[in-house]
Image (spheres, rainbow, N blue to C red):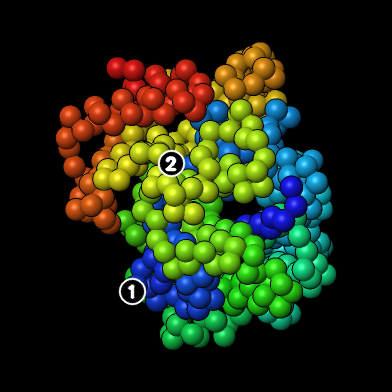
């Protein structure tokens, strides 16, 4: 069906509390995101499905939770994906990204779902710049430094050379080359403000930086051990990198307007997950419960002709809802495997909500739940085996099951597909076993929106566990998940 235009813009690791759109006291300077909010509908209870990076993207691509069946991995042969469905139905699809994990082991087949794609090099551990001589390193530092990234930085002679600016500049070029285009789906991903929080010094000066301690722009994941001035410095580095991303996001929006690609285009502005920068005396993600700073993420949606611009939605939504929503706008049939909900009615104002509650989490971590009032984070029982189910046995930077091959089974174990898969016992080397999840905690998000005072209420806890049980059933959860979190007892 012609006449539809859709863009997803994703900034990685975006803690929504740093945006004025979500927090009037936010100090990060993001004028372009602020302006886009005025043209858009703001979702105030939008949650992740699966964390971290690649699991979150598989959620977006497939409209179903990744975290129930595996950790980090590629698009599977049995996955039905949004860009591939659109491509097969005659829609022009294109991806522009500097997210290096797409071209590493464990990131297979995502880019190939698109008709065409651009990959911008240089972020994080990207195996890009080759130098026989070791790069200049820091004598003193907090957190992390990395030789490969220091090599990559030698290519950043100006702001325009940094990967996120290059990503949005490439997106601007795409708009210039496709002026007045119709019937397209474009996905633009900036890795920033993911760590390392690296940008030209002029952005850091916006925050009146006076820090003179050891180098620190790349956080460790865990409890804070750095002094207070270093934590404030790394927060300013995060703000500065976000401000740089915001400036280039604004250039992209301007290019859309200049090329008649803005007013009548459905545009989603989202993230994959948040990040902790000293809150709760923690930095990073993955190793703790998915508190709101990590799981309650931004989503701004611009409707064609700016319909309902400036409005707010208080219903519970998730990133798995993007696929069915976009298919709905094209009037394409929803695949049977999809478990997300179309938000078209919510966006148009004809529907109040699509769900009463949601689950989310990270494979091998806690099982998380949220509704309009409560959040519950259930600590796992580590004595219960858990399994990864996949037909492509890769994960972040390595292969699954190596060293315990005799424990791997094959069969048709997944409830939503007849495709045979590996059933691989999850070992510590194959998943991120959280170190700081010691007990189950529950919060009342109305009276304690910052989640600082855990509550105990056995009746509420029992009711929520029953709700979780139903959500696990609806989402085709493997049977051991019920046992691992004592959902059936």
Displayed quadrant of residue 431 = top right
Q: Which mark is residue 25?
A: 1
Observer able to see residue 404: no
Question: In front here: 52 or 266?
Answer: 266
Seen at 40% across and 21% down, the residue is 482
Image location (x, y in percent) of residue 93? 76, 52
Q: Earlier in the sequence, mark 2 or mark 1?
A: 1
- In this view, the residue farthest toward the front is 350
Secondary structure beneath disc 2? loop
Measured as percent of width and height from the top left, residue 5 is found at 69, 58
Element class at badge 1: loop
Residue 430 is situated, as x and y percent measured from the top left of the image, at 58, 33
- The answer to whether residue 313 of the structure is visible from this angle is yes
Circle 1 residues within 10 Å: few <14, some 14–19, many ≥20: few
Q: Which residue is mark 2?
A: 354
- Would you identify the image quadrant in which residue 113 lies? top right
Front of the two marks 2 and 1? 2
Density class for disc 2 (Cα within 10 Å; few <14, some 14-19, many ≥20) is some
Question: What residue appears at the point 81 percent right and 61 percent down from the top-left corner?
Answer: 130
Q: Quadrant of residue 155?
A: bottom right
């Amino acid at each position: 069906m012609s006449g539809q235009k859709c863009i997803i813009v994703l900034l990685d690791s975006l803690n929504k509390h740093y945006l004025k759109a979500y927090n009037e006291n936010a100090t990060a300077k993001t004028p372009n995101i602020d302006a886009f909010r005025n043209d858009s509908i703001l979702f105030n209870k939008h949650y992740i499905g699966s964390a971290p990076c690649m699991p979150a993207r598989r959620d977006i691509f497939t409209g179903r939770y990744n975290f129930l069946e595996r950790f980090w991995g590629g698009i599977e042969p049995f996955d039905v994906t949004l860009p591939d469905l659109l491509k097969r139905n005659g829609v022009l699809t294109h991806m522009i990204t500097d997210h290096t994990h797409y071209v590493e082991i464990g990131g297979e087949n995502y880019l190939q779902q698109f008709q065409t794609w651009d990959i911008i090099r240089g972020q994080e551990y990207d195996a890009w710049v080759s130098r026989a001589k070791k790069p200049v390193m820091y004598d003193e530092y907090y957190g992390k430094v990395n030789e490969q990234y220091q090599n990559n930085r030698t290519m950043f002679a100006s702001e325009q050379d940094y990967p996120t600016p290059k990503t949005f500049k490439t997106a601007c070029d795409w708009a210039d080359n496709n002026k007045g285009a119709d019937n397209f789906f474009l996905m633009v991903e900036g890795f920033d403000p993911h760590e390392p929080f690296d940008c030209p010094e002029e952005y850091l000066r916006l925050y009146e930086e006076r820090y003179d301690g050891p180098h620190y722009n790349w956080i460790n994941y865990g409890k804070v051990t750095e002094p207070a001035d270093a934590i404030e410095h790394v927060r300013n580095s995060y703000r500065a990198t976000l401000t740089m991303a915001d400036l280039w996001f604004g250039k992209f929006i301007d290019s859309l307007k200049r090329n008649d690609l803005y007013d009548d285009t459905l545009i989603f502005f989202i993230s994959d997950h948040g990040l902790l920068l000293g809150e709760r005396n923690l930095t990073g993600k993955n190793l703790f419960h998915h508190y709101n700073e990590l799981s309650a993420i931004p989503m701004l949606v611009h409707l064609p002709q700016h319909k309902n611009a400036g409005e707010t939605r208080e219903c519970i939504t998730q990133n798995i809802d993007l696929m069915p929503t976009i298919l709905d706008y094209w009037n394409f049939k929803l695949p049977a495997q999809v478990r997300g909900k179309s938000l078209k009615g919510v966006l148009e104002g004809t529907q109040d909500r699509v769900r009463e509650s949601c689950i989310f989490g990270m494979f091998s971590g806690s099982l998380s739940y949220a509704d309009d009032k409560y959040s519950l984070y259930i600590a796992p029982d580590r004595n219960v085996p858990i399994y990864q189910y996949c037909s492509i046995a890769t994960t972040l930077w390595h292969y699954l099951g190596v060293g315990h091959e005799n424990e791997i089974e094959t069969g048709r174990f997944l409830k939503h597909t007849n495709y045979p898969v590996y059933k691989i016992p999850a070992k510590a080397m194959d998943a991120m076993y959280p170190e700081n999840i010691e007990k189950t905690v529950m919060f009342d998000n109305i009276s304690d929106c910052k989640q600082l005072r855990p509550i105990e209420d056995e009746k509420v806890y029992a009711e929520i566990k029953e709700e979780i049980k139903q959500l696990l059933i609806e989402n085709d959860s493997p049977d051991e998940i019920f046992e691992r979190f004592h959902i059936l007892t």
